[in-house]
Image (cartoon, grey):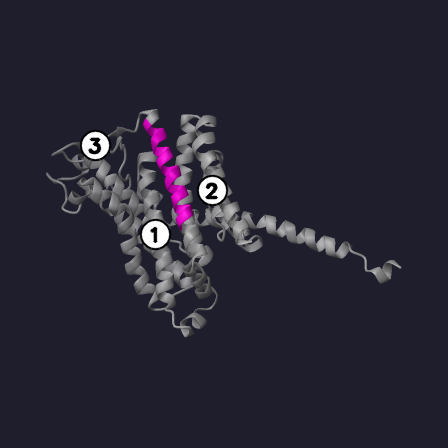
């Protein structure tokens, strides 16, 4: 049975690679491929949510913070590179009074530091927060509220730092990506391929963690912390690992979102975007990696399509979608096949007539 599951997983992985690398670039226009790149970044966040929430029961409503940290780390380097040696980024010349880069901007001029920071900075912040939260056995709704408050505070802080973060506008008009001009369609396709490859790697990493001994321990902590503690494991450490890994995935997604879209702003990392990340995973199926990825892409696409027609009503529709998914389909769309199979088996069993009655 395990061999069959592995073969099915590899087949699905190969099928996804073919769709992303062979079919999508041929079928979609450059504009639509750019939109798909944006949606795949949302799917990368959903992979982390699947690990933390779907397997560990951690309702992470603050993933926008880690998405934003990775996005701003990447955008800061790209803005410095666009400005050129010795020059300030354009928004600093408009809004700021400084004649040189702020001290905390300077390390991001180094591409190696910036790339590492896109993942390690969100993970470090998550580790500090996780130690504070999990050591005090904060969980459930309290954990969700704290993570959401963090997202709100981070967005408010960014808005207030207009001279150094761009304020409400954020970091915009990003023109290059490590020496490649982003207005060139060929380079835009390159960015798409990088994002698609990163998504597949994150799915492989998450699947490895889920199927490992750690994944079993994470589920055990979700179901019964006290029993796990009695067996000699510290549930706080188990949850901390999932939280930190999910943060790193969100940071990488934010970093790749910047060259795909050309902007990062507080509007993309506050409470509403954090909830949108969770909605995508919930609709697709938070316990299924494939379901979470497809759900995130579907919700992101629906937002783009429907918000153009119903800009004022989309947020309400999104909230209703989340409520319906949790209330009537807790396993998401990924659980539909199981429900149909159970229903079919039930019908078959009830249709069998006992031999005594037939006589």
Question: Disc 1 marks which residue?
Answer: 247
Residue 208, given in percent of the width and then of the height, sits at 42, 52
Residue contact between numbered discs 3 and 2, judged by CB atoms under 8 Å: no
Q: Residue beneath label 3, please? A: 82
Q: Tell me if mark 3 has few (under 14), some (14-19) or many (20+) residues whose alpha carbon lies within 10 angstroms of its own.
A: many
Residue occupied by mark 2: 13
Q: Is residue 198 magenta?
A: yes
Choose the circle earlier in sequence order: 3 or 2: 2
Comparing 155 with 358, the one in front is 358
Answer few, some or many: residues within 10 Å of disc 1's Cα (few below 14, many 20 plus, some between 14 and 19): many
Disc 1 or 2, which lies upstream in sequence? 2
Residue 21 vertical placement versus 1 (above, below): above
Q: Secondary structure at mark 2?
A: helix
Side (left or right) of 237 relative to 19: left
Asked if residue 99 is among those painted magenta in the image, a careful observer would answer no
Q: Quadrant of residue 215?
A: bottom left
């Amino acid at each position: 049975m395990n061999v069959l599951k592995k073969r099915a997983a590899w087949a699905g992985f190969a099928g996804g690679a073919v769709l992303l690398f062979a079919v999508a670039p041929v079928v979609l226009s450059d504009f639509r491929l750019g939109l798909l790149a944006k949606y795949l970044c949302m799917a990368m966040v959903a992979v982390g949510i699947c690990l933390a929430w779907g397997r560990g029961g951690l309702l992470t409503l603050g993933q926008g913070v880690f998405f934003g940290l990775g996005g701003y780390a990447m955008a800061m380097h790209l803005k410095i590179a666009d400005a050129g040696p010795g020059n300030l980024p354009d928004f600093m010349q408009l809004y700021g009074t400084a004649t040189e880069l702020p001290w905390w901007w300077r390390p991001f001029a180094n591409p190696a530091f910036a790339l590492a920071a896109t993942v390690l900075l969100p993970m470090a912040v998550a580790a500090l927060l996780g130690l504070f939260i999990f050591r005090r056995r904060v969980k459930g709704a309290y954990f969700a509220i704290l993570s959401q408050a963090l997202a709100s505070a981070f967005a408010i802080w960014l808005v207030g730092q207009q001279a150094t973060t761009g304020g409400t506008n954020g970091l915009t008009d990003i023109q290059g990506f490590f020496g490649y001009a982003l207005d060139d369609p060929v380079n835009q396709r390159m960015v798409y391929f990088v994002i698609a490859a990163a998504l597949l790697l994150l799915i492989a990493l998450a699947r490895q963690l889920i199927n490992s001994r750690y994944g079993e321990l994470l589920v055990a902590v979700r179901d019964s912390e006290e029993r796990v503690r009695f067996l000699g494991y510290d549930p706080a450490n188990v949850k901390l690992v999932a939280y930190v890994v999910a943060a790193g995935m969100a940071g990488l997604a934010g970093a790749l979102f910047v060259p795909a879209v050309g902007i990062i702003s507080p509007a993309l990392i506050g409470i509403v975007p954090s909830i949108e990340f969770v909605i995508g995973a919930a609709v697709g199926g938070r316990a299924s990696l494939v379901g979470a990825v497809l759900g995130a892409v579907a919700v992101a696409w629906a937002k783009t399509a429907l918000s153009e027609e119903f800009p004022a009503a989309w947020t309400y529709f999104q909230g209703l979608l989340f409520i319906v998914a949790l209330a009537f389909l807790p396993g998401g769309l990924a659980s539909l096949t199981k429900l149909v199979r159970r229903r079919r088996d039930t019908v078959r069993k009830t249709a069998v007539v006992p031999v005594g009655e037939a006589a």
